[in-house]
Image: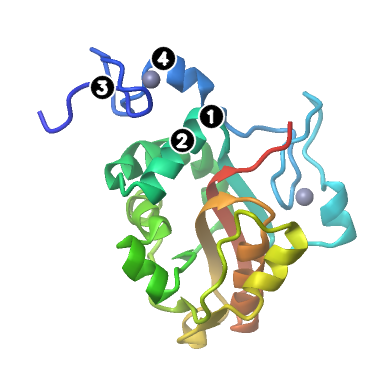
């Protein structure tokens, strides 16, 4: 056996590991993002029940994409798995993470009619340091599953940016401003594009990518992320 049946998150032995390799306790901690949520940015509302509708901040300043959705709430076990995947080079975690993402996101992705899947790029220096782009690793199996071509060489990060983690929303926006460019805008012209990233925090990165892709002539822009920061 390549992997012993241990929980990816807590290393507990799980005889009936299934495809996810998460023990029941860890799996219970993984929260999917569900309706009611903002029809644009996908933020879930705290009050249960009711219809999806635009949130206050999307009404005040409509996003540059048509809609964004995330699979999981970025906390607890889900956050730990994403951190291990990204920063501790546990690339095998791409498998449970894409399984969790596909379960939650497939109906939305089908509804978008997306023609291209574009992972948010890393700067080549960051790529060299990390050794992989987490969004590309997630994108490969998801592109296959969704039957959408994965395009990794068109959208590029042309400027090295500070890590966003400690920055405020306004600082994040400034930090990524002008950080992306397209190698071949003609390839997205008139196309319905699906952007993929690991975590949606304030949306500044995908917003800036969306701006560049729209300028390049993309007809529609949608965003999917593995997880989303959720208040409370
Ligand atoms: Zn566990
Ligand atoms: Zn919103």
- In the image, residue 119 sits, relative to residue 104, either above or below, namely below
Crowding at label 2, few (<14), some or many (≥20) Cα neighbours within 10 Å? some
Residue position marked by numbered label 2 in the rendering: 80
Crowding at label 1, few (<14), some or many (≥20) Cα neighbours within 10 Å? few
Task: Measure how far apart labels 2 and 4 are at the Cα level.
Answer: 16 Å
Residue position marked by numbered label 4 in the rendering: 24
Q: Are marks 1 and 2 in contact (CB under 8 Å)?
A: yes
Circle 1 sits in a helix, a strand or a loop, which is it? helix
Task: Measure how far apart labels 3 and 2 are at the Cα level.
Answer: 16 Å
- Asked whether mark 4 and ligand 1 are closer than 8 Å, the reply comes as yes
Residue position marked by numbered label 1 in the rendering: 76
Where is residue 6? Give x, y as percent.
26, 22
Task: Measure how far apart labels 3 and 4 are at the Cα level.
Answer: 12 Å
Q: Of label 3 and label 2, which has the lower sequence position?
A: 3
Where is residue 186? Give x, y as percent.
50, 87
Q: Quadrant of residue 218?
A: bottom right
Q: Of label 2 and label 4, which has the lower sequence position?
A: 4
The N terminus, quarter of image: top left
Circle 2 sits in a helix, a strand or a loop, which is it? helix
Residue position marked by numbered label 3 in the rendering: 6
């Amino acid at each position: 056996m390549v992997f012993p049946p241990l929980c990816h998150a807590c290393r507990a032995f799980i005889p009936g590991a299934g495809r996810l390799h998460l023990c029941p306790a860890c799996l219970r901690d993984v929260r999917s993002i569900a309706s009611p949520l903002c029809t644009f940015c996908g933020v879930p509302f705290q009050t249960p029940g009711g219809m999806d509708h635009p949130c206050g901040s999307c009404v005040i300043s409509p996003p540059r994409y048509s809609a964004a959705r995330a699979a999981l709430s970025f906390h607890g076990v889900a956050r730990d798995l994403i951190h291990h995947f990204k920063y501790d080079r546990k690339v095998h975690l791409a498998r449970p993470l894409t399984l969790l993402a596909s379960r939650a996101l497939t109906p939305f992705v089908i509804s978008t009619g997306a023609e291209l899947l574009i992972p948010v790029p890393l700067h080549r220096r960051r790529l060299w340091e990390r050794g992989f782009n987490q969004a590309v690793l997630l994108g490969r199996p998801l592109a296959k599953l969704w039957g959408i071509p994965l395009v990794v060489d068109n959208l590029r990060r042309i400027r090295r940016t500070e890590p966003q983690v400690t920055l405020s929303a306004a600082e994040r926006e400034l930090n990524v401003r002008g950080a992306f460019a397209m190698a071949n805008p003609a390839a997205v012209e008139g196309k319905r594009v699906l952007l993929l990233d690991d975590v949606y925090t304030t949306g500044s990165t995908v917003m800036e990518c969306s701006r560049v892709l729209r300028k390049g002539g993309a007809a529609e822009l949608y965003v999917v992320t593995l997880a989303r920061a959720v208040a409370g």
